[in-house]
Amino acid sequence: MATDKLTVEDLLSFPALQLSVKAGRNGLGRSVSWAHVCELDDPTPWLLGAEVIMTTGLAIPRSAAGQRRFLELLDDAGVSALALSAQLHTPPLHDVFFRTAEERDFPVLEVPLAVPFIAVSQEVAAAVQDDARHRLGAQLQVFGSLRWLVAEDLDTPSLLRRLERLSGYDVYLCTPQGRPLLPGVPTPDPGVLPSSVDAPPTVPGGFVLPVPAPGGPAGFLVAYERQGAQPAGLAVVQHIATVAALQVAMVRNERETLRREGAETLAELLQEVLDPAAARRRLARHSIEGDAALFVVRHTPDEALLHCLEDHPHLLLTRGGDRYVLGAPELADAVGGLPAVAAGMSRPFRPGAALKVAQREALWAVAKAVESGRPLVRYGADATGRWLPEDPAVLNALVDHVLGEVLRYDAAHDSQLLVSVRTWMERDRRTETAAAALHIHPNTLAYRLRRFGVLSGRDLSSTGALTEVWLAIQAAGALGLTD
């Protein structure tokens, strides 16, 4: 059972101290954890809250505005009371000093000259011994929390709830941006988060501490005193932050393991080395059990992509400049909203299906996204794509029959015949517009069109030949043979 806290009013009842109240009598119910002598203009960076600050008066500013600000700093830092030594160095106290103390219910006490400050500290230390024993016991039990985690297989929310009951605090966790840090643990009001990891840990009613991680804090732990509980103090909250850091490391390790396994699974699916049953089992481990789609993502920052995917079941594989993502078709909205993205999406398919067709569709769609400047293109939304056969062998035969000589010529001479013809056709055969897009003279483009016609054996002024070439170019794009 929690013991009663020491209060400022209790100190007034100690006959040996002979304390008197100069202002702020309505705040005498404030709890006291320690009494300390301080002559600094601003002691708040070194305070934890609930202290009685004792001064000979050297710390008190002489101006009225300075005296008001001094009391406000102490009160905002959670100081319990200010104790002034009588007849020493205290400057004249202005009316605003006393008004501020009354407005804030901040006790201002006077210590007789005959009573040394050490006597006040000794009385407070003796009075809080029981609370100190409680805090030590809480610390030892927090140290043992990792044993609970292993022996009882506690999940993160259950572990934190037990630590809350033990410590006397309500605990919140978040990333530096205010997002959830651990699953099932509530986030605090972002307004309480410090602007720097070096900020003092004390906030009204509790503490804010960084959760350590390699490379910088993973986030912040906010602990508020629980109503009717006996708070165990900063040291216990620091230990809870360490436990949270270990949990974050475990969660990150699990996610990284799943990410690596997911990349391996997606690579094997693309290589078609998994039978359908094994593929379905692998996908189920990653919570992918309904219709899926394959995405190819380009240009967007990796951090933005990972953040977009973190709340959705998915597999992710990087190949060169492309990021392959396998997940639910509903991912299209999130992927399409990424900054500066160019993405292609296959048609939905059932888990376990071979991915060669889906890969071809996604690559064709991302090429269209790059060409058009659209963030995401879905395969099948383009009228031409619907006329292409799905069999890669048929597509290869079409490309070789129509474009084979051109592709070989481009490869041997590092020329741009195919790109030039595709750009010209995409711009509705407007030579000047296409030449500008290619950064070449219209006469140069005209030469390339004639050269393409000779090599392909197709007269581009013929509607039939033009249609055949256009379909062959789309097929080459679907097979990944064009940029």
Image: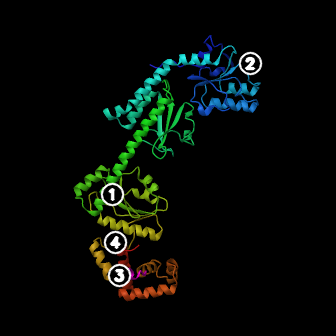
Q: Which residue is mark 2?
A: 87
Report helix, strand or loop for mark 3.
helix
- Cβ atoms at labels 4 and 3 below 8 Å apart: no
Of callouts 3 and 2, the N-terminal one: 2
Report the Cα–Cα distance between label 1 and label 3.
37 Å
Structural distance between the alpha carbons of marks 1 and 4: 21 Å
The circle on residue 479 is: 4
Q: What residue is disc 3 on?
A: 408
Viewer-side label of 1, 3? 3
**Crowd rating for badge 3 (residues with CA inside 10 Å; few <14, some 14–19, many 20+):** few
At label 1, the amino acid type is: Ala
Residue range highlighted in magenta: 402-416
Q: Residue furthest top?
A: 15
Q: Is residue 379 visible?
A: no
The residue that mark 1 highlights is 292
- Amino acid carrying mark 2 in the image: Gln
Q: CA distance from mark 2 to mark 4?
A: 92 Å
- CB under 8 Å between callouts 1 and 4? no
Magenta stretch contains residue 412? yes
* Quarter holding residue 126: top right
